[in-house]
Image (tube, rainbow, N blue to C red):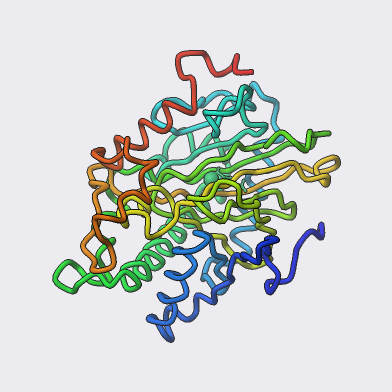
Amino acid sequence: MLHNTEEASTAGAGSNGTTIPVIDFSLFTSDPSECARQVGEASKNIGFFYLRNHGIPQALIDDMFECSEQFFKQPVQNKSKHMIGPNNIGYSPMKSERLDVEHQTEGDVKEAYNVRKYSIEEDSTKYFTRGNEVQLKQVGTFYKDLHRLARDILRCFAIALQVPEGAGGQAYFDGSHEWEAESGTTLRFLHYPQQTGDPHTPLAGSHTDYGSITLLMQKDIAGLEVQASRTHKDVPWVAAPVIPNTILINIGDHLQMWTNGLLKSTMHRVVYNPMQLHHSRYSIACFIHANDDTKLDPIPTPLITQDMRAEAVEFEEGRNMTAGEYLHWRLARSYNFEQPLEEAK
Ligand SMILES: O=C(O)CCC(=O)C(=O)O
Ligand SMILES: [Fe+2]
């Protein structure tokens, strides 16, 4: 076991005192309004929070990391059979994605494999689990557990945002986040290989996530950094360390647009960690997206006003899109699907 963790009390402390809070999610059962208050507060400020007592068995998370390691250690020609395309399913090779489209000339120093909800039984997921039936079943269980957790977290948002009962109350987001519906929701296994690294080159460029919320699990090696403010670009980056037995949650662009910027879709990136001289870094992200046909217009809540629109101005281009169209637009900016991905440099 590698040791590169920090105590929860100091997690992500930036030089300006900004911290990423750790929230005990057992509160969701014992005191939902207090849980919603803490989730809402974190999301209005840094846009990131850790959850402990989240209900996903650690043994299952460990097994998923094991499955991921076994996949990525294969030769590249084996991994490339199910290449990613505009459907966002399958293998994305080293340097094929540029998350910071404006500043990166080279692609991210990472490889990834994406599983989509409706592909759990499909070839691409079977390929990821290399014919291992137990792991195939586990991916399905893991994915559904994460989706269920995400819906509980979204209930906290609806409570914190005071969505009126007539509009759905705490269940407001349930209908737009159905397991069965077509959506961009994606389970992504990431690998940042062992390397000498350049401390100035991000391994994943600065970006915001495209969906509603992201659930992130990091293994052993830290590297994620978050920018505490969307409006002040010169604020320092804050480290998001690995805290055992927690899942890190962040707000994505949907929630920022739905709330006219009240909730923050925070910029983040992955930087080189010297531990990567000797070890690979692995993470697993579950990107929760609204059903494809969901509008990204402000939601009904007394806390959101028209004059808050300026806060969300960076996403003005996405304003009149549905969730499905927005994902398509963001992916087309980050990948060059015109160029065969095997040749991506
Ligand atoms: O690997 C990580 O820790 C974060 C990755 C990330 O932010 C992303 O893939 O959107
Ligand atoms: Fe991200």
44 is higher (above) or lower (below) than 86:
below
Residue at position x 78%, y 45% in the image = 273
Image quadrant of ligand 1 equals: top right
Name the image quarter holding the C terminus: top right
Image coordinates for residue 251, horizontal then vertical, percent: 45, 55
Residue ID at (50%, 32%): 90
Query: What percent of the width, then of the height, locates residue 185?
Result: 39, 46
Residue sitting at x 47%, y 75%: 38
Q: Quadrant of residue 4?
A: bottom right
Q: Residue furthest bottom?
A: 30
195 vs 163: above or below: above
**Snapshot quadrant of residue 161:** bottom left
Q: Farthest residue in the left direction?
A: 166
Query: Does residue 174 appear to the left or right of 37 in the view shown?
Result: left
Depth check: give the residue in front, 313 or 153: 313
Rendered view: 124 above or below 285: above
Residue 114 horizontal/vertical position (percent): 50, 38
Residue 251 vs residue 308: left or right?
right
Residue at 45 percent across and 14 percent down: it is: 338
Q: Nearer the viewer, residue 230 or 108?
A: 230
**Residue 233 visible (yes or no):** yes
Quadrant (top left, top right, bottom left, bottom right) of the N terminus: bottom right
Residue 106 percent coordinates (x, y): 63, 23
